[in-house]
Structures are given as structure tokens and as C-alpha cells.
Image (cartoon, rainbow, N blue to C red):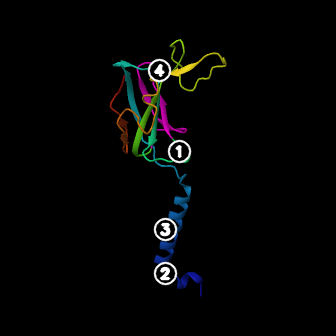
Amino acid sequence: MHLFDTVCPRSITKALLFISALVLAGCSDGKPAMNPVRGKVLYKEAPAGGVLVTLTRVGADDIKSQASTGSTDDEGAFNISTGQDEGAPEGDYVVTFIWMQDASGKTKKPGTISMSSDTATVDKLKGRYSNRKQPGVPNVTIKKGVNQLEPFHLQ
């Protein structure tokens, strides 16, 4: 008598399905699904190039949350990324903006570093849109799939 003579084929099939499900679940990297997010920033109705756009989850813990960011091109258009991944997870977000420029008025591209210590930089928007508690624009909701946000009109 063999072991398989006493085991029900349905039990074997159920066990194999269960083990397969566990293996597949273990292969997940635990990251939430990313959804493409695109938009445009206008300053006094003109495209604003070089603006850092940040999406922070509503109610997010400062230490544990990862913000989603993008910077505008010369046409004011941006694409959002979260870490190395393009897009943002589904949810409600506070949107903030910082538009850095040197004291002479020349826009600084987000992420650039000046080796000169005598070049002062300031936010062209004077902090009006950089406070998450009073962002200056309505929150946005990121949904599953491609998200084309309405243009942001800054003054």
C-alpha cells in the first residue's frame, strides 16, 4: 500500500493551490500600485518652469510617509514620481509648490546644487503654496489609472 492510495486527489489539489497562493503572495514587493499623475502649473496665467510639485497624503505622518514629487518643464507640465517609481498610489493628497530662484530672479531647477555659497536662493512664491497645513490650492484625489490633474493657477 502506497501513501497516495489513501490520500484524496482533491486534497492534494487543494494543498497545491494553497501553497501556490502563498508563494505568489511572497513574491509581492509590498509596494502599493502606482498610478500615472500629470498636470500643469501656471503662474499669473503663464507656464511656470522649474516649480517643485509635492503630493503628500492627507493625514500622513511626516517621518513615515514618502511624498510624491515632480518638477515642471518650461511649459509648466509635470509628471509625478514616488521614489524611483513613476506615479503615486491611490488616495487623497495635499499639493504644495516651491519655485526656487537665486536672488537675481533666475529660476533654479529642482534638485540642482550650487557650489557657490554666496548665491542666495528664495521661493518666488514666497511660501504661499509650501505649507501643507494651508497649501493654497485644493487637495487632489489620485484614482486607479492615469490621472490628468486640472491646471494649478498660482498668483
Residue located at (36% from left, 37% from top)? 147
Which numbered tag is attached to residue 136? Answer: none
How far apart are labels 3 and 1 at the CA level?
A: 41 Å
- Say whether disc 3 or disc 2 marks the residue closer to the N-terminus: 2
The type of residue carrying mark 1 is Asp
Direction from residue 71 to residue 38 in the image, left or right: left
How far apart are labels 3 and 2 at the CA level?
A: 15 Å
Q: Residues within 10 Å of mark 1 (few under 14, many from 20)?
A: few
Position of residue 70 relative to residue 94, above or below, is: above
Residue located at (59% from left, 88% from top)? 1
Direction from residue 14 to residue 4 in the image, left or right: right
Bounds of the magenta segment: 67-88
Q: Which one is nearer the viewer's eye here, 104 or 29?
A: 104
- Say whether disc 4 or disc 2 marks the residue closer to the N-terminus: 2
Residue located at (55% from left, 55% from top)? 27
How far apart are labels 4 and 3 at the CA level?
A: 59 Å
Q: Quadrant of residue 4?
A: bottom right
Mark 1 and 2 residues: CB-CB less than 8 Å, in contact? Answer: no
Residue occupied by mark 2: 8
Residue occupied by mark 4: 124
How far apart are labels 4 and 1 at the CA level?
A: 25 Å
Q: Which label lies toward us, 3 or 1?
A: 1
Q: Which label lies toward us, 3 or 2?
A: 3
Residue occupied by mark 3: 17
Instruction: Give how far across and how far down residue 22 sits, in percent.
Output: 53, 64
Instruction: Give how far across and how far down residue 24 sits, in percent.
Output: 52, 59
Residue occupied by mark 1: 62
Q: Residues within 10 Å of mark 3 (few under 14, many from 20)?
A: few
How far apart are labels 1 and 2 at the CA level?
A: 54 Å
Instruction: Give how far across and how far down residue 126 sits, in percent.
Output: 46, 24
Quadrant of the image containing the C terminus: top left
